[in-house]
Image (cartoon, grey):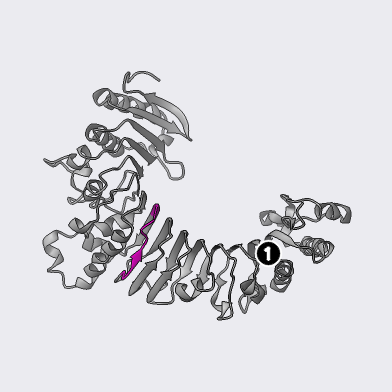
Amino acid sequence: MDGREKFFILSSPVSQEVASLWTLVPNLNDDSVFLHPEEGKGKRDGIRQSFVDFVDRILAMQGDSPIEKFSLKCITGVHPDTVNRWICNVLQRGVSDLNLFIDFSYEDIEDGYYLPREMFVSKTLVELKIRSEHSVDLWTVGEATFLPMLKTLDVDSDLIYCGKVEMLLSYFPVLENLRMANMVRMESHETVSSASLKKLTLSIQWEDYESPKSISFDTPSLLYLNYSDLVADDYPLVNMKNLVEGRINFMADEDQIEQARAPDNDLLANDEEAIVLPFDNVMKLMNGIQNVQRLYLASDTLEVLSLCGKSMPVFNNVKILYITSDEGRAWQAMPDLLRNCPNLEYLVMEGLLHYVTDKCGDFCDCIARGDKGRSLTSCPVTKLEIRGFKGTMREINMIRHFLRFFRCLKEVGIFPEEDDPTNFENPGVFELVEKILNLYHDEFSSCDVVFLVDNHLRRKWTAQSSLRV
């Protein structure tokens, strides 16, 4: 070894002799009885104390020797002061990679749990990951916080309190990867500014469901964005010219969805114009990410984009487009979106069932219309993947629609739904679907169609011979 010890501390009641051996092993992995609270063993006082004694013994044996990586999974029954003592121990020994999973009992954190102050002044931390079933409060980092080496900050908990993101980022001058899952927004005006940030995941929670006034992104080095939030009234600055992958999930309420589906001539006459205005500003965000190569849009985002109409930017670099569908959300934006992805190669549809409106355009086969399939015929997509297929006739007809009008298709992959109920639970449905797909493929046999179940090939129809398996 290079003088910097590497080990994972995992819960397990072991003997002194075994513990002594563990201090010499670079990496330890153990699946112990303490990690299975569903069995009730982790709640026993003896088991909990055995775990505490074990960790104390290991740390004592290590003395003040340097340590590179420390991973702690601590669930139920260990006092927060004990956990913070362990964290401070490895911080004092120069830990660079700290991975914490902490889940305290409510009795132990009646006044809240605060991470040790020493964590936020470490000169050696490079990677910090925190998982918690409770809230994580980063408000307490304070003005003295400074982690000059930190490149990864990954926090995932029930709720995250951190104040202004702009202030938080100023403490990490070389941060490259920031993930904040379930962050509670406290400010109406927010700026995400970092010259070093390359990967950003922000999932924002609004307890009162009030849209933010403004959000700016000044992240010129950003390559990956995963952003989930309410639609802001304004996006004054969006600097992401180097973005490669963007995942946008806007959360819209029912009033906003109703506005998105209203006839065009009703929009200006609506007394609640304030509902419409925020959607105009979405284009500022979309224009800022228009150099993206892989674009992922959630079902609510599609409804939001439908109000942007002709102002939707052209995504010349998009090669992969991933769309999530929902039975309560419509596809009005799809025709414009396809036309504005002139170099699209790979389209993924997570679900085909959606809310049908007369504004879904020619992309949808649910309403008869004269210009059926026009946006599909001009689309250069060569590979189509359909996930979450439930085996309904409505979905099968949609697949037929795609086979007929996507003229450049070379490959279609169909994956059945695995988590929710489907028609495939009924006897003979798989065989019926195969028969119908075979007939459709005979009619439109310009591409290979692959039907997979649990990622294993069930049936393949080739462009040369629709009967070949």
Residue 60 image point, x, y percent = 83, 65
Residue visible at 37% across and 51% down in the picture: 296
The answer to whether residue 39 of the structure is visible from this angle is yes
Answer with left or right where residue 79 lies relative to residue 205: right
Q: Give the range drawn in magenta.
A: 235-246
Q: What element carries label 1?
A: loop
Q: Quadrant of residue 38?
A: bottom right
Q: In front here: 24 or 175? A: 175
Query: Which amino acid lies under the numbered mark 1 shown in the image of this protein?
Result: Thr
The residue that disc 1 covers is 76
Q: In this view, does 426 lie to the left or right of 6?
A: left
Of residues 103 and 123, the one drawn nearer to the viewer in this rendering: 123
Outermost right residue: 17
Can residue 237 be found in the magenta stretch? yes
Q: Residue 222: x percent and y percent?
A: 43, 59
Q: Out of 330 and 203, give the one closest to the viewer.
A: 203
Rendered-image quadrant of the C terminus: top left
- Image position of 387 with respect to 41: above or below: above
Task: Give x and y (percent) for residue 294.
Answer: 37, 48
Callout 1 crowding tier (Cα within 10 Å): few <14, some 14–19, many ≥20: some
Q: Where is residue 461 in the image (x, y as percent from the top left)?
A: 35, 24
* Main secondary-structure element of the magenta-colored stretch: loop
Picture layout, residue 386 above or below residue 335: above
Seen from the viewer's position, the closer of residues 14 and 338 is 338
Whether residue 389 is visible to the viewer of this picture, yes or no, is: no
How many numbered marks have been drawn onto this rendered protein structure? 1
- Quarter of the image for residue 249 reads bottom left
Give the residue drawn at x 45%, y 63%.
Answer: 202
| Residue drawn at x 68%, y 64% as measured from the top left | 76
- Compared with residue 425, is residue 250 higher up or lower down, i.e. above or below? below
442 on left or right of 434:
left
